[in-house]
Amino acid sequence: MNTNRLVIFDLDGTLFRTETVDIEAFNNALAVLGYATRSEKEILDLIGLTLDSICEALLGTNDQGMVEKFRAQVIEFEEKAIAASGKLYPGVTDFLKRLQNKGYTLCICSNGNEEYVTAICNKFGFNSVFQDIWFERKGITKKEAVSILKKKYNAEKFVMVGDRLCDIEAGKLNMGFSIGVTYGFGGNEAEEADFKADSIQEVEKAIYKVFEA
């Protein structure tokens, strides 16, 4: 393993097209519990938060009993939607295989819940590509999770790729390089990154610029 070629990816809005799953899943769960459904924008603006935080925002309450009930419904609908209609961004599979073949150490660091992340990884065969797949752990921020992965792989140099400010800050605050993708859900948040990428192809170019220049 080359410990100086660690690349950590966010999942939603970076590799996985969350809108192919979560608009349907959240609205179905809201309807089951008797709540009004939400617009695509309202739901996608929350992508990147933990599931509990999204549930609280959509329900307008932090009542843990209601949040847990909603959470369970969302997970059930997400797993069905991932299997039926979940999609990656164009070019992701071949891109990841190229990095793997070049000897890069690849990890996922997501705020998504375990069931959701596992369902995506199983569908797209990510378990054979990524050395580590990190999902939400209560009490551990993305910055702390990236620090754990950096130490685990003894990475003197690493890249964090994501669409949200929390991804970019997780890279920078752990003394790594950050690539902000503009095709995800973070909008102008990508401007804060060391590199900005409008496509998977530009992500790949930025990674090579860091490690192979």
Image (cartoon, helix red, strand yellow):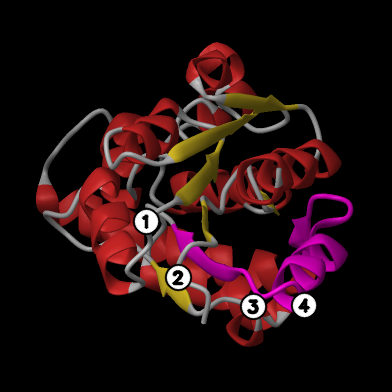
Q: Looking at the image, is mark 2 or mark 4 nearer the viewer?
A: 2
Judge left or right: residue 206 versus residue 138. right
Look at mark 4 in the image and give the residue it sits on: 101
Q: Secondary structure at mark 4?
A: helix
In the image, is residue 88 part of the stretch drawn in magenta? Answer: yes
Q: Along the horizontal axis of the image, is 198 left or right of 72?
A: right
The CA distance from mark 3 to mark 2 is 20 Å
* Residues tagged 1 and 2 counted as in contact (Cβ below 8 A): yes
Residue 153 image offset from top left, x and y in percent: 36, 72
Q: Say how many tags the image has.
A: 4
Q: Assign the C terminus to one quadrant of the image.
A: top right
- Residue 11 point in image, percent of width and height: 56, 54
Q: Earlier in the sequence, mark 1 or mark 3?
A: 3
Q: Would you call the spot at circle 4 few (<14 residues within 10 Å), some (14-19), or many (20 or more)?
A: few
Tag 3: residue type?
Phe
Amino acid on which disc 4 is placed: Asn
Distance between the Cα atoms at labels 3 and 4? 14 Å
Q: Residue furthest front?
A: 213
Residue sitting at x 64%, y 45%: 14
Residue at image mark 1: 156
Q: Give above or below for 44 relative to 93.
A: above
Check disc 2 and report the residue beneath it.
Answer: 3
